[in-house]
Amino acid sequence: MSTPTPHIAAGKGDFAKTVLMPGDPLRAKFVADNYLENAVLVNPVRGVNGYTGTYKNKKVSVMASGMGMPSIGIYSYELYRYYDVDNIIRIGTAGSMHKDLKIRDIAFAMGACTNSAYATQFELPGTFAPIASYDLLRKAIQVTEEMGIHYMAGNFLSSDTFYDDSQGTMKWTKMGVLCVEMEAAALYMNAARTGKNALAICTISDSLVTGEATTAEERQESFHDMMKVALEVAISQ
Ligand SMILES: O=P(O)(O)O[C@H]1O[C@H](CO)[C@@H](O)[C@H]1O
Ligand SMILES: O=c1cc[nH]c(=O)[nH]1
């Protein structure tokens, strides 16, 4: 398929090699408005606005994924395959499932478990383990430590459901899973399949352990840490 695609109206070359990808289109706009210089809207389709600008004089893009694995599956596939994007860094929110991972902390997905059937398309004779790009993860942890930001790195759960009637989510805690979100596993699988790189960074917006949740204001503040880390990683590539 050539560009534009059914979901992205940009032309070839409109995206940087690294795209930051929050679930929320307004978080993408926030990054473009507050961190990128000369940001240009390169995709308006479905309100999933994509922007390309510069950060510290280097070209960086930001575009939302929407919520869930079908949605990030489409956007990451098209960016990797048709826009020659090399790196996608998810900047998301997640619910903590680990007592040591507090609200406002940031977490890196070394790997992403899932209850989704996304991997069945690859017809593998076993279970695929979706993992982060080692280079992106290593750089992100280096930057985070230099900034003095508290973080955890480990396994995520990428769930197909936000409202889980089976109440099965916490069972993953017994396997050491840190937190639950809804996209990392599909992003990592698409990166693997296309030979590209991906990293998911999440800010903990609520805790399934304690029941605490951040306010909108608090979330905005703590999101800055995640955004700055992702931008520093982006310009290192
Ligand atoms: O804040 P974002 O990046 O959208 O991430 C989380 O928030 C959404 C659910 O509220 C899901 O997309 C989940 O992964
Ligand atoms: O997917 C998500 C995101 C934040 N908090 C949750 O509990 N789930």
Image (cartoon, rainbow, N blue to C red):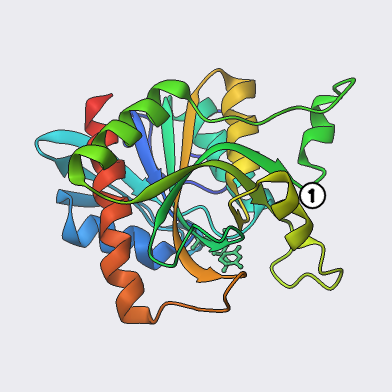
**Can you identify the residue that label 1 sits on?**
115
Height in image: 41 above or below 12?
below
Q: Residue furthest right?
A: 125
42 to the left or right of 208? left
Label 1 CB less than 8 angstroms from ligand 2: no
Q: Is residue 157 left or right of residue 18?
A: right
In the rendered image, residue 56, in percent from the top left (x then y), is placed at 10, 38
Query: Taking 175 as reference, is 204 above or below it?
Result: below
Q: Quadrant of residue 217?
A: bottom left
Residue at x 70% of width, y 29% of height: 129
Q: Residue drawn 17% across and 50% down?
A: 36
Which quadrant holds the N terminus?
Answer: top right
Q: Position of residue 9 (x, y in %)?
A: 44, 46
> Where is residue 110 drawn, in percent x and y?
54, 34
> Residue, x 61% and y 23% (percent of image)?
192
The quadrant where ligand 1 appears is bottom right
Report which quarter residue 128 is drawn in.
top right
Is any part of residue 223 visible from this angle? yes
